[in-house]
Every structure is written in structure tokens, then in C-alpha cells.
Amino acid sequence: MPFGPFYCVFRWDLSSFEYSEPPHPPETLLRYADAGEIGSVAEVWYEGLKDEPGAPWGDYLKKWTPGTAAKWFLDSQRRMGARFLVAEKEKALVGMNGMIIEKRSGIGRFFTGVVVRSAERNLGIGSMLLHCSLRDIKAEGLRKAEVETRDGITASKYLYSKFGGKKHMVQS
Ligand SMILES: CC(C)(COP(=O)(O)OP(=O)(O)OC[C@H]1O[C@@H](n2cnc3c(N)ncnc32)[C@H](O)[C@@H]1OP(=O)(O)O)[C@@H](O)C(=O)NCCC(=O)NCCS
């Protein structure tokens, strides 16, 4: 019998992406982070993964600190044009999604996954980030979006299946 953790990939076919915007939680706006904010983006990512119930990212996070994650994000920005969609509420960053637009393969990759601060969950911010990311990737002329994640966590159970996301299991 195989034991976990089990990994999966969610894929969206953007040729059939015709979903209207989900409701905006009050006072939350979405925008792309500028270079000076990458440290705060990395903090949201690190703290958000740490605060997932059951600590599924515990082993993974041993390799990272918010500081080393910021270096990774800046490097991805410099080398691959990565961009970071952020959710802002009362002038603080409360959610993020990092993406790489691969023009050659036609795939927009969510290379950080969608992450929302634990105090702000279940209000629709994750759905807003996902919808806007998919819409923007389609607007860039890409045909697909993709995220790698772990099976059984909140994102795989409730978020990534939205807006036509299809799950594919990955052999680990
Ligand atoms: C996954 C995550 C981003 C969702 O963010 P969020 O802001 O809570 O998402 P939303 O409020 O838009 O919820 C999306 C859907 O999931 C449901 N949902 C969210 N959390 C839930 C929970 N704990 N239990 C049951 N349903 C839940 C919502 O009810 C909503 O369903 P609906 O579309 O039918 O109304 C957030 O839980 C998170 O940051 N988790 C830790 C980071 C992580 O593991 N990210 C994935 C990296 S690959």
C-alpha cells in the first residue's frame, strides 16, 4: 500500500474560461505587487503555508524562511518574469499568487500556489485571486493554467476545482 503525501496537478482549459467574477469581500482589492513588496509577499506565502491545518507543508517549509523565499521570488521575477498577484486589505497584504507566463508552452503556472492569511480565510479572497489569475493568463493569450499541489488539503478539496479546474494525480 502506498503512503502519502500524495501530490496532484490542477489544470484549467482557458479556451472555455467564461466565469464571471466572484463576489468581492469588502475592502479587499487585487493588484500586482511591485519589486519593493516582494519581502511582504514572501511573508504571506510562508505564514500562510505554515498555518494550513494539519501542517501538510511542514517538511517543505524547513527548507525556507521568509527571507530565502523572497530571494527565490525575486530571482524568479528576474529570470522568468514571475509576477505576484496580491490581495490587499486595510493597506496590508492578506493573500497572494505567484505566476509564470510560459509563452512557449502556452501555460500559466501558479508556481507558489494561492495563499491567504489564516485570519482572512473563507471570505472569498482565495476565489478572487484564482479567478483574476486565470482571467489575466487568458488575456495574455495562453491556453492553459496549472498548479502543482498536495492532495487532500484545503486548496485541493475546495479551491482549485473552481472555474473549471481539473485534478490529475501525480506519482511521487
Ligand atoms: C486554500 C486557500 C488559499 C483558500 O483561501 P480562502 O480565501 O479561504 O478561499 P475562499 O474563501 O475563496 O474559499 C473557496 C471555497 O473553499 C471553501 N473553503 C475554504 N476553506 C474551507 C474549509 N476550511 N473547509 C471547507 N470549505 C472551505 C469556501 O467555502 C469556498 O467554497 P465555495 O466556492 O463553494 O463558496 C487557503 O485556505 C490557504 O491559504 N491555505 C494554505 C495555503 C495553501 O496550502 N495553498 C495552496 C498552495 S498550492
Image (cartoon, rainbow, N blue to C red):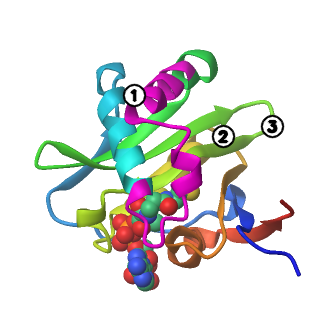
Q: Is residue 103 magenta?
A: no
Name the residue type under label 3: Ser
Q: What residue is rendered at 79% in x and 74% in y?
A: 3
Label 2 is placed on what type of residue? Gly
**From the viewer's perspective, is 5 left or right of 110?**
right
**Depth order, front residue of 59/171:** 59
Residue furthest to the bottom in view is 1
Element at label 3: loop
Would you say the residues marked 1 and 3 are in contact, meaning their CB atoms lie under 8 Å apart? no
Circle 2: element type: loop
Q: Is residue 29 above or below residue 10?
A: above
**Ligand 1 is in which quadrant of the figure?**
bottom left
The amino acid beneath tag 1 is: Gly
Q: Which residue is mark 1?
A: 67
| Residue at mark 3 | 105
According to the picture, the residue beneath numbered tag 2 turns out to be: 141
Tell me what residue is drawn at x 38 percent, y 55 percent. 48
44 w.r.t. 58: above or below: above
- Lower sequence index among marks 1 and 3: 1
Label 1, label 2: how far apart the Cα atoms are: 33 Å
> CA–CA distance between discs 3 and 2?
11 Å
* The residue stretch that appears in magenta: 50-75
Say which quarter of the image contains residue 66: top left
Residue at position x 50%, y 50% in the image = 133
